[in-house]
Amino acid sequence: MSKPEEKITIAISNLTELLDSFTQIEQKRMEIELQKALKKKDREIENIKLERDILKAIVDDGKAIFNWSTTDCDGVHSQGSAEFKTLEEYEEWEEKIPDWVEGPFSHQLSKEPIEQTSWGHGWDIN
């Protein structure tokens, strides 16, 4: 093989490797985008299921009860319940959660409310 042919062969090989590398990067980017889209759809499905469950509770029981718990920055744990007669009431409450929660927070639909209590190491908690 002559020098020019060898250079062409090397150049083609380099271009092929570069194209393969680009293809792998593009495939990975597409996989990441697909995973993001799937996670978004999963959240949408979970929201629809929650709305269905809230509406079912309102129809069956006249209200939807959510038990909640939280821990604030001083280590005080609190728990309680909230009751809603409409989906809109629940959505308004959920939007305001960041206004009164200072740390980890969870809530779930329940058939029975729990007593509102607090405990831990806060300023005025025993």
Image: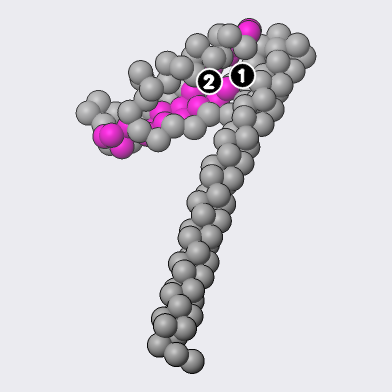
Instruction: Please state which amino acid type lies under the numbered disc 1.
Output: Ile
Q: Which sits in the foreground, 122 or 2?
A: 2
Query: Is 106 covered by the magenta stretch?
Result: no
Which quarter of the picture shows residue 103?
top left
Which quarter of the picture shows residue 111?
top right
Name of the residue lying farthest toward the bottom: 1
Which residue has dot 1 on it? 65
User: What residue is drawn where x is 36% and y is 20%?
Assistant: 100
Q: Quadrant of the C terminus?
A: top left
Question: SS of the residue at dot 1?
Answer: strand
Name of the residue lying farthest toward the left: 123
Dots 1 and 2: beta carbons under 8 Å? yes
Which residue has dot 2 on it? 81
Label located before the other in sequence (1 or 2)? 1
Question: SS of the residue at dot 2?
Answer: strand
Q: Is residue 32 above or below residue 122?
A: below
Can residue 123 be spotted in the picture?
yes
Q: In this view, does 9 lie to the left or right of 34?
A: left
Task: Characterize the magenta stretch by its predominant secondary structure.
Answer: strand
Task: Please report the bounds of the magenta region as a residue range.
Answer: 65-86
Q: Which sits in the foreground, 55 or 43?
A: 43
User: What residue is drawn where x is 61% and y is 19%?
Assistant: 65
